Image: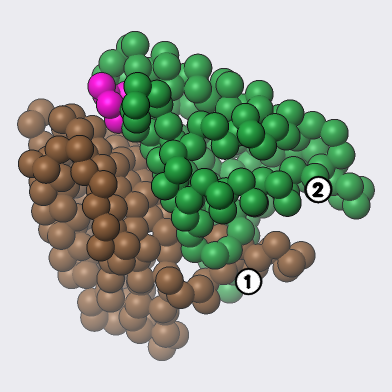
Chain colours: A brown, B green
Amino acid sequence: MTTANTNATTEAQIRALIDEWTKAFRAKDVNGVTSYYAADIVTFDLAPPLQYTGADALRKGLEEWFPTFRGPVGYEIRDLSITAGDDLAFSRSLNRIAGTRTDGEQTDVWVRSTACYRKIGGNWKITHEHVSVPFYMDGSYKAAVDLKP
Amino acid sequence: MTTANTNATTEAQIRALIDEWTKAFRAKDVNGVTSYYAADIVTFDLAPPLQYTGADALRKGLEEWFPTFRGPVGYEIRDLSITAGDDLAFSRSLNRIAGTRTDGEQTDVWVRSTACYRKIGGNWKITHEHVSVPFYMDGSYKAAVDLKP
């Protein structure tokens, strides 16, 4: 775990937010997860369209996606880097999403995650999130869901 | 074009950086493009691997990629949002990459771009960049290179 901090206090606050977010995500706690997002969050997600606007769209996505997992969602964060200022921060990491889906399929994929934060009304909120995998440039245009860090 | 600014002066500086970066990118000016990146830039790019570390890796990628275009690279930025503090900033946008490749293929793809900036030695530098397309969740795992904003 590497850290490029400019403000140790706010960096610790962002780290705590990520920890709490991760616990809520693993527990498929939609209210918990969405509590960390600004109302006007813009998300660049794994699935189309190009962007989702607003916490309601994000909530709807989680409400549909979480139940496709049997039991908790496996979620691991690696190579986390947090850069924190007084009122702004951003983080990047490689995150592993793993688990068994209700149709029996095993999901195990590493994604790249970038999150941008603002302090709003005294609380840190995620105002932008970008999650993706790259794709193969061999003409197949297949998403690279088989990469390991 | 929407803007969520916290500091109008630094927002203008980031906007100028993006303008200059875009001109250099269109002109396939490797030195120009890389001058805006921090030496320890970490990039989540369209192509594997999951991440590229350092400006040298980024330069090498551009040196290989730019010559695959005949003439200039078409580059358009839409829905740009800049959030700027005193020493940190981040931006997001939908960017169109278009042009004719040396093999005659037409490229025309909209990507999501997130960039994170720090003021280093008095100059703004991109310290992290994340560029991607989503992928179809229909079992094909195809990169969604055909989406329009």
Q: Position of residue A97 (x, y in %)?
A: 35, 71
Q: Position of residue B102 (x, y in %)?
A: 89, 47
Q: Residue furthest right?
A: B104
Q: Nearer the viewer, residue B42 or A58?
A: B42
- Return the disc, 1 or 2, that comes first in the chain's sequence: 2
Q: Is residue B25 visible?
A: no
Magenta-colored span: B83-88
Q: Is residue A34 visible?
A: yes
Q: Quadrant of residue B116?
A: top left
Q: Residue furthest front?
A: B121
The kind of residue tagged 2 is Thr
Residue B72 falls left or right of residue B60: right
User: Which residue bears the numbered disc 2?
Assistant: B68
User: Which residue bears the numbered disc 1?
Assistant: B140
Residue A35 falls left or right of residue A61: left
Which element is circle 1 on?
loop
The kind of residue tagged 1 is Ser
Residue under the image location 58 percent in, 27 percent down: B21
Provide the chain ID for the residue under circle 1: B
